[in-house]
């Protein structure tokens, strides 16, 4: 009986002292908002993925008129597949919240002239 009281007191003490450690973590409302944001972001990436082909053509230098189309379609297809796979990953793993990994559609990195 005395051993049971000691065990109960130990568990209660650990619980009471461990509560302040977790006080800085996200609340349930933050968690629900984060997983909802990630799920919607994943669906948005899936739906926006074909737009990467158009962005690939638009972002190519205009001085190469014919090759601009073919190179743009090639790059756009690669970026479309990347956006599609990231979108599927975010939609499936929405229960684990995390930051966005892709920039918005058609956003260009000016320094490298490639989609960021």
Image (cartoon, rainbow, N blue to C red):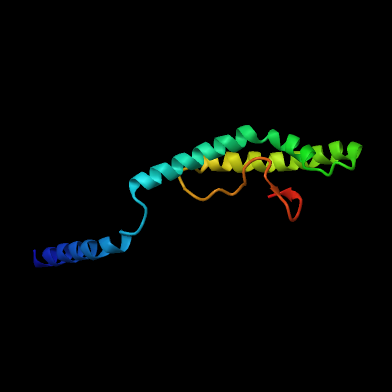
Q: Quadrant of residue 70?
A: top right
Asked if 12 appears above or below 46 in the picture, the reply is below
Q: Is residue 85 left or right of residue 28?
A: right
Q: Is residue 74 left or right of residue 52?
A: right
Q: Residue at x 59, y 40 (%)?
A: 87
Q: Residue at x 55, y 48 (%)?
A: 100
Q: Nearer the viewer, residue 2 or 81?
A: 81
Question: Residue 11, position in %: x, y?
Answer: 20, 63
Q: Residue at x 79, y 38 (%)?
A: 57
The image shows a total of numbered marks equal to 0
Q: Residue furthest left?
A: 1
Q: Quadrant of residue 13?
A: bottom left
Asked if 47 appears above or below 23 in the picture, the reply is above
Q: Is residue 78 left or right of residue 29?
A: right
Question: Residue 45, position in %: x, y?
Answer: 60, 38
Q: Quadrant of residue 2?
A: bottom left
Question: Residue 107, position in %: x, y?
Answer: 67, 44
Considering the image in quadrants, where does the N terminus appear? bottom left
Q: Residue at x 21, y 62 (%)?
A: 16
Q: Nearer the viewer, residue 94 or 107?
A: 107
Question: Residue 68, position in %: x, y?
Answer: 86, 39
């Amino acid at each position: 009986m005395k051993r049971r009281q000691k065990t109960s007191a130990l568990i209660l003490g650990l619980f009471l002292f461990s509560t302040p450690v977790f006080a800085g973590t996200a609340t349930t409302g933050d968690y629900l908002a984060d997983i909802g944001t990630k799920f919607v972001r994943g669906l948005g990436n899936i739906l926006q993925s074909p737009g990467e082909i158009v962005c690939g053509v638009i972002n190519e230098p205009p001085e190469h008129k014919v090759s601009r189309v073919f190179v743009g379609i090639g790059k756009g297809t690669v970026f479309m597949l990347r956006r599609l796979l990231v979108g599927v990953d975010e939609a499936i793993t929405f229960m684990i919240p995390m930051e966005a990994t892709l920039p918005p559609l058609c956003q260009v990195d000016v320094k490298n002239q490639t989609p960021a």
